[in-house]
């Protein structure tokens, strides 16, 4: 194209033709594989609805990603998968490390898959960020399921707060269900707040216990025991059968002290051995009975609706917090105020009010601009 600058009458600088691009000095650079382009939401949704595991995994990766571009696609995929979700049994499984969760999930999973269908094993492990690797949901921990063609195992999302990790797992459930997974297990370590998060996304909450784990530990478990729809005492094999039965009796009498459950279901206590595969069918019969019971009395739908509402507010909370704390101006104001509060020069409440005032004034102004 003619440049007006090249006109003879033009008195400014002239444009010379450029030099040609030299060949790459490092031949290996060209061979480097290019990053896969971001798939379109419709492509992912089509794949998921066909049960394509690669597409499902890619969509889950986007759900877990912190990048805003990825989140935009992920949210569109979730929205489109939502009408195809919900048709599954969601079972939460918790227990302290060493209780035998992975061994048990391996055999419970195979038991469930005997009747056909598909199983997704997800996990919530808020500690995985600290340990720089996920403890739960690791494929190598569930050897038989890992090679089963109808099982999809996904480790815990790692980044972020418990709320963020839990929200991602909740969204992954939607994708898995749309992909035809009619059994969902959500595993978590029974040591903290994560049980509450899991409880809020499953239909049945299974607590794996061990015989003879000291009174102090059982005390911590009280809150968790109240959430459990079934308590199962693992490792009831060999010399441990007697102690396991004793623990069963103790748990049964402890459960009598709890108030009646909202579902009307009386939580049951069973013993089994995941390793020797004893009593597995009995545990699963209990879970089947629970589903029959809550579907008959309507609690199944009530709970799902309550959970949907809970996740709406959780999602709002999470996004508000992220929007607030990720704002660079707020972050620096927080640092300043924190130093003042620590030095006893400002009250916590005045500091909080000032930072919030700044946030409300400036963020809302910029939103309406
Ligand atoms: P997790 O940390 O809860 O996932 O527990 P694991 O499934 O990794 O099990 C912890 C240990 O307990 C492993 O060494 C298992 O082999 C053992 N274990 C698991 N289930 C049983 C069982 O039913 N009986 C016996 N004796 N050992 C078991």
Image (spheres, rainbow, N blue to C red):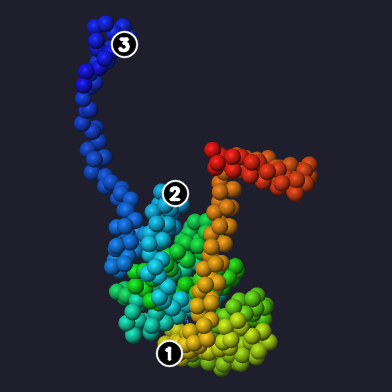
* Mark with earlier residue (3, 1): 3
Q: Secondary structure at mark 2?
A: helix
Which corner quadrant of the image does residue 276 belong to?
bottom left
The residue located at (59%, 78%) in the rendering is 227
Q: Is residue 259 above or below residue 325?
A: below
The residue located at (32%, 65%) in the rendering is 48
Residue 30 x/y as whole percent: 24, 40
Left or right of 132 in this view: 149: left
Q: Which residue is mark 1?
A: 281
Left or right of 181 in this view: 206: right
Q: Which residue is mark 3?
A: 13
- Quadrant of the image containing the C terminus: top right
Q: Mark 3 and 2 residues: CB-CB less than 8 Å, in contact?
A: no
Q: Secondary structure at mark 3?
A: loop
Q: Which residue is mark 2?
A: 68
Which corner quadrant of the image does residue 254 belong to?
bottom right
As drawn, the residue found furthest toward the front would be 368
Left or right of 175 in this view: 92: right
Q: Is residue 36 in sight in this rendering?
A: yes
The residue located at (67%, 84%) in the rendering is 259
């Amino acid at each position: 194209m003619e440049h007006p600058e090249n006109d003879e009458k033009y008195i400014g600088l002239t444009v010379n033709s450029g030099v040609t691009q030299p060949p790459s000095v490092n031949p290996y650079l060209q061979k480097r594989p290019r990053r896969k382009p971001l798939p379109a939401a419709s492509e992912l949704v089509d794949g998921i609805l066909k049960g394509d595991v690669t597409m499902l995994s890619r969509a889950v990766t986007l759900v877990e990603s912190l990048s805003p571009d990825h989140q935009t696609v992920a949210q569109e995929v979730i929205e489109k998968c939502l009408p195809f979700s919900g048709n599954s049994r969601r079972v939460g499984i918790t227990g302290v490390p060493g209780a035998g969760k992975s061994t048990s999930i391996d055999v419970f999973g195979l038991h469930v898959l005997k009747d056909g269908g598909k199983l997704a094993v997800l996990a919530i492990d808020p500690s995985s960020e600290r340990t720089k690797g996920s403890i739960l949901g690791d494929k190598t921990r569930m050897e038989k399921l890992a090679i089963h063609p109808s099982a999809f195992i996904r480790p815990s999302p790692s980044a972020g707060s418990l709320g963020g990790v839990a929200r991602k797992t909740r969204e992954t459930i939607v994708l898995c269900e749309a992909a035809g997974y009619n059994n969902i297990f959500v595993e978590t370590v029974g040591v903290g707040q994560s049980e509450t998060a899991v409880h809020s996304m499953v239909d049945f909450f299974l607590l794996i216990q061990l015989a003879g784990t000291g009174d102090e530990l059982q005390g911590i478990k009280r809150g968790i025991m109240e959430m459990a729809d079934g308590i199962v005492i693992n490792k009831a094999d060999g010399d441990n059968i007697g102690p396991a039965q004793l623990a069963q009796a103790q748990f049964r009498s402890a459960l009598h002290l709890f108030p009646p459950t909202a579902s009307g279901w009386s939580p049951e206590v069973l013993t089994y051995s995941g390793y020797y595969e004893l009593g597995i069918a009995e545990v699963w019969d209990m879970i089947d009975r629970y589903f029959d019971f809550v579907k008959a009395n309507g609690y199944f739908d009530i709970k799902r609706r309550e959970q949907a509402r809970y996740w709406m507010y959780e999602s709002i909370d999470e996004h508000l917090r992220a929007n607030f704390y990720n704002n660079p101006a707020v972050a620096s104001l927080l640092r300043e105020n924190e130093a003042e509060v620590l030095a006893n020069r400002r009250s916590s409440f005045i500091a909080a009010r000032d930072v919030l005032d700044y946030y409300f004034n400036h963020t809302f102004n910029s939103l309406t601009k």
